[in-house]
Amino acid sequence: MTVGLFIPCYVDQFYPGAAIATLELLEKLGVNVVYPENQTCCGQPMANSGFEHLADGCNKLFLKNFAGFDYVVAPSGSCVLHIREHLHSDDKPNLATELSQKVYELSEFLTDVLKITSLPSKFPHKVGMHQSCHGQRGLHLSQMTELVAPDFSKPGRLLQMVEGIEIIPLSRKDECCGFGGTFCVTEEAVSVKMGKDRIEDHLQHDAEYITGVDMSCLMHMEGILKRQGSKVKVLHLAEILNGK
């Protein structure tokens, strides 16, 4: 198969290591990966703020860059969810619908498409797993604790394959970190308080690292950790799964 690598703006600009780890991991697993160099924003920030009609150029460019691949994979649950639910085209509606169903977040691609059962990676550290809201409630990457239903976590299943890792328990494992895209700008005080609460849960359980499938959530928590002078670090899931 040939996969188009879809990298969100903030990953490209601030956390290229997560993008590189995604590429290397997919290639290690035998996937032919192509990175369309003209890709830009998927349009999610505009849609989140109520201006989806201004994202038409983003939709057209996404179609131009990624139509024709067997799958499109991104290290971002929120961007993937946006494309699945909002990608559209007045000129090519059928193509837009078809492409939107080929876009996968990294952990669901590894578990649902590649169906991997082992990873040649090592990470001998205590790690807290942050369940991002878009991934959990939109893409169903993990079970919601308020439901009386079997528990599962696709990112968690992958982390269990990593040699030496200790996944710490959390008191509230699927609580929002408060980032919420443009929410953290319009409701800064609430966003920060939620972030502090989310971090405290990890700190109380002695996490050395906090990981997740969305660098946006991790970026939010990283900012708070640095302001607190904490030694706890954040790493995208791909960077741990790609570890040696």
Image: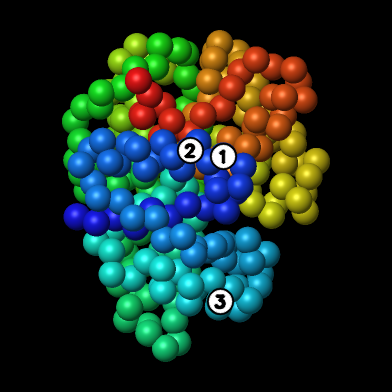
Residue 16 locus on image (x, y percent): 53, 41
**Mark 1 = which residue?**
15
Relative vertical location of residue 75 with respect to residue 52 in this rendering, above or below? above
Element type where label 1 sits in the image: loop
Asked if the residue at tag 3 contacts the one at tag 2, i.e. Cβ–Cβ closer than 8 Å, the answer is no
Q: Earlier in the sequence, mark 2 or mark 3?
A: 2
In the rendered image, the residue lying farthest to the front is: 37
Amino acid type indicated by mark 3: Gly
Mark sitting on residue 57: 3
Element type where label 2 sits in the image: helix
Q: Is residue 185 left or right of residue 36?
A: right
Distance, label 3 to label 1, CA atoms, is 25 Å
Q: Residues within 10 Å of mark 2 (few under 14, many from 20)?
A: many
Q: Earlier in the sequence, mark 3 or mark 1?
A: 1
The residue positioned 49% from the left and 55% from the top of the image is 79
Q: Residues within 10 Å of mark 3 (few under 14, many from 20)?
A: few
Element type where label 3 sits in the image: helix
Amino acid type indicated by mark 1: Tyr
Q: Residues within 10 Å of mark 1 (few under 14, many from 20)?
A: some
Amino acid type indicated by mark 2: Ala
Report the number of discs: 3
User: Which quadrant is the C terminus positioned in?
Assistant: top left
Q: Is residue 56 left or right of residue 123?
A: right
Mark sitting on residue 18: 2
